[in-house]
Image (tube, coloured by chain):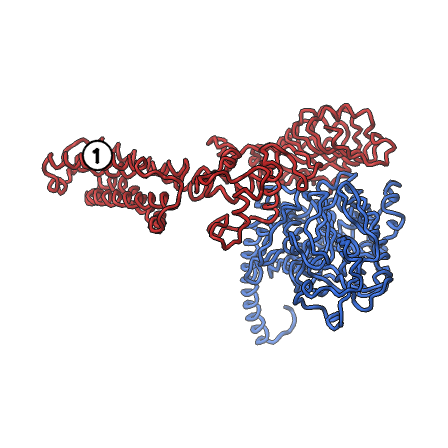
Amino acid sequence: MSSGRASVKFFPTSKTTRVLWAGALAFSIGLVLLPWGIKLDGQTHADWEQFLGRFHPLVVHLPIGLLVLVPLLELAGRRRPALREAAGFVLALAFAGCAIAFTLGFLLAYGSGGAGVTLSRHMAGGIALTIGALLCLLARWSWASGASVQAYSGLLSCTLLALVWTAHMGGSLTHGSNYLTQYMPAGLKRWAGVSEPTPATASFYTKHIHPILDANCVGCHGEGQAKGGLRVDSYDTLMKGGQDGPVIVAGKADQSMLLTRVTLPTDHKQFMPAEGKPPLRPEQIAWIKAWIEQGASPTVAELQGVSRGDERAEAPLQPVGDYSSLMAEIRQMELGQGAKLKQVSAKPEDGLVLFTVDVAPSFGDAQLAQFEKFAPYIVDAELGRTQVTDASFDTLKRFTHLHALHLEGTRVTGNGLGKLAGLSELNYLNLSGTQVGPETSAGLKSLKSLRHVYLYNTPAAGNGQQAAAAPRSAT
Amino acid sequence: MDLAVPADLKREWADLQTRRQFLGRSGKVLGWAAMASLLGNRGLRGDTHGSAYGNQPGEALKLPHFAPKAKRAIYLFMSGGPSHVDLWDYKPGLAAQYDKDIPDSVRGAQQLTGMTAGQARFPIAPPHWEFKRYGETETWVSDLLPYTARMVDDLAIIKSTNTEAINHEPAIMLMNTGNMNAGKPCLGSWLAYGLGSMNDNLPTFMVLQTKLSTKENNQPVSSRLWSSGFLSSEYAGVGLRSSGDPVLYLTDPDGLDREVRRKMLDAVNEINRQIYEELGDPETNARIAQYEMAYRMQTSVPELADLSKEPTSTWDLYGPEAKEPGTFAYNCLMARRLAERGVRFTQVYKRGWDMHDNVTGILPLICGETDRGCYALVTDLKQRGLLDDTLVVWAGEFGRTVYSQGGLSKDNYGRDHHPRCYTTWMTGGGVRRGITYGETDEFSYNVVKNPVTVRDFNATILHCLGIDHNKLTYKFQGLEQKLTGPTPANIVPGLLA
């Protein structure tokens, strides 16, 4: 191991080292205390602060690159000592970069009125990183003067970890916290323990208001940053308002600042969404207005004049499992049977649709049974006008994610419908034109999640000619 | 080469041959590169015709972009421009304005058609018919549409549709293809291209024309409207004829049985395949696919057209004229049968709405011809459980002026084209039912609230079918072409369930 003689020359006395350590300690304490000294109050401050601060994203990537370079140089230095000498220089540059980036970042946050959890974490990370880089610098010098290498390598590892965390927080600030996980494959998500956003209960707020705010406002008024002290990412924070008081006054749309700000002329200084983001659509504004006027409730499901009573909450579709390993068999099935299994959408987790219409005359219970292997992935079974009978229920009961079942015009009589009782997502059942009789109503009642049942042109529909689309009665 | 050919000619021929082969081959390579970029990267085609060309689930299949509410759509196109003033857009104040000039402030600097631009005055012609309220939604509907009025609670009525075109051809093109100029693929072709077939035995996109009932006002519709434009021609609409055989030459001639036809097709396909190998023109494959489709349609179309198994309730609902091929009622019934058989998109054309004069004479005829069919179709789909995943659209290319074209009397008037606002409706999968969307001023002349452009209208239709209109694109002439065109379009959330 070369001992870095050049460094020894520059820092020959232990006294100098002690002074340097003391100075570094004082600097670190000052940096740690800074957020208490100058609080991020969520207010905007001087323009020059924002002007300089906006160079933060430009500068910030420099120390990242330099810091990552340091361990590489140290390792490579084992073979080529010149590289190791460069490592000290690069580390010094990295520290300087950290200090400048932190300063600019702080100016940006303070000047533009940033606040919030993610921002605080990002700032804490920046402080830790700057201090880490400084301590690394000193530890390296100590190591060069004969101290043990462990302190340096340990500190450097910690600093790099702090770098990753800080950079991630910074990314979450600019791109949103789900930026990395949004398009993560479903399997990886489960492995990483990333939770899917839970489907909201169907109140007007969760169904219409929250999605508007989420798509248009949360970038600046959310967990990441809460400009003007306002967060609209949850009902509670929305109603709490910002530093200028509440933004929603229940029942009084004209006094609700949120509505005022989104309805100003688009070139008005206070118009929201700010910074050239697209204005809200007229319907969205109308929904917000109606919601405020009718009490701004988090739970009310319908508003007069906006949503109608016949909108029934439908159970959200559950993602099906991963069937990618069965792809070859699915293709083989199609070639052999003619019946098709198609993806509902580009998202595999939306499941598969079973189409049989072009082979309906030759598609019976035996053919259906061959699809049992794919049962948990089929959400929609289009068996209309095929030759399937009541025996098909024994296969269909294994279609655990089945959402819609088309049996119109088949030989089904409804005997054994109760076998489908375990299908908790079955929402739509079409039995039109079958011989289903009135006695099947018990079987139907056991299918709790059904919302749409069709019995047109069946004995069960009375004289067989009346439309029997009676979704309500089935629930 | 047994012929006695002079040596120099032979040499020249050989030279040409190599050059031709070289060019042919490069063409093929280019063709494959183009195919790969079309199919491989974007994998837009669901599947089309049999396993040979079929696309498998998950295999580069990128459509629908999200789980669709509607699997298929039926579009009732009212060619000529139905009068929103007389049918839908009730303005009680108009009666008092009879024969008064429409205020200049309402008309503004609008350019008029050559048919009324020369008129000395623009006298307001209030609708000749009464309006009444119907349904739980208490929606105003004209006495001309007694059947449609029964189902208003199921419709999303759009009073603020507006277009940029003021004459038929560009306006119809714009509604059907998103562009006023011919040559772009129509909505049905985009859907066939993007979503593929659910039933290999029938075309993905079918067109039903309604027989003419009056001699007046029939603006022509032509195959430009169901053309696939720059998309492969297998995505063009396939028409069912209104009289005689639904599809010409589908039945085998005497003495030719299906087996012989099969052999003939195999031979023709083999030749076509060789041509494709040689030249790499994708249209050759389209031709092979169409021959095969026609072969399968030999059995699927007779079954489709056989109405003998329809229950009597069908005739009670659609009316007796539904038994006569080519009537609007027949086409509505056929549209339902096509929906049942997995046809992705059916477009029904009804001409005759272009009433520059004699509105009181003709409008009742055209309404009488279409009103019951529309009601029957929606009601039938609903009772059979098909309305949950079928989108139904009723629209023309523009509306008609509130002022009279030509002479105005208590008994009669004419109406000119009016692009600034007109009424359309949709219902079915993905659509919020029982609403009226958008508002016009008291003269039914300008949109005052929630305008819906043709682009927005088409974007919303695509949305119901699980398609992001900005992502369904096709590279042509250096542009990422799409149905809604380059001007930004927005889906209309207020119309969505």
The kind of residue tagged 1 is: Leu
The chain letter corresponding to blue is: B
Relative depth, front residue between A155 and B374: B374
Parent chain of label 1? A
Residue in the image at 75% along x and 26% along y: A444
- Residue A435, picture quadrant: top right
Question: Which quadrant is home to the N terminus of chain B?
Answer: bottom right
User: Around disc 1, counting alpha carbons within 10 Å, would you say few (fewer than 14), some (14 to 19), or many (20 or more)?
Assistant: some
Residue in the image at 19% along x and 45% along y: A82
Residue B203 location, x and y as percent?
A: 72, 51
Relative depth, front residue between A65 and A287: A287
Q: Colour of chain A?
A: red
- Residue B138, picture quadrant: top right
Residue in the image at 70% along x and 46% along y: B72
Residue A171 location, x and y as percent?
A: 41, 42
The residue that disc 1 covers is A25
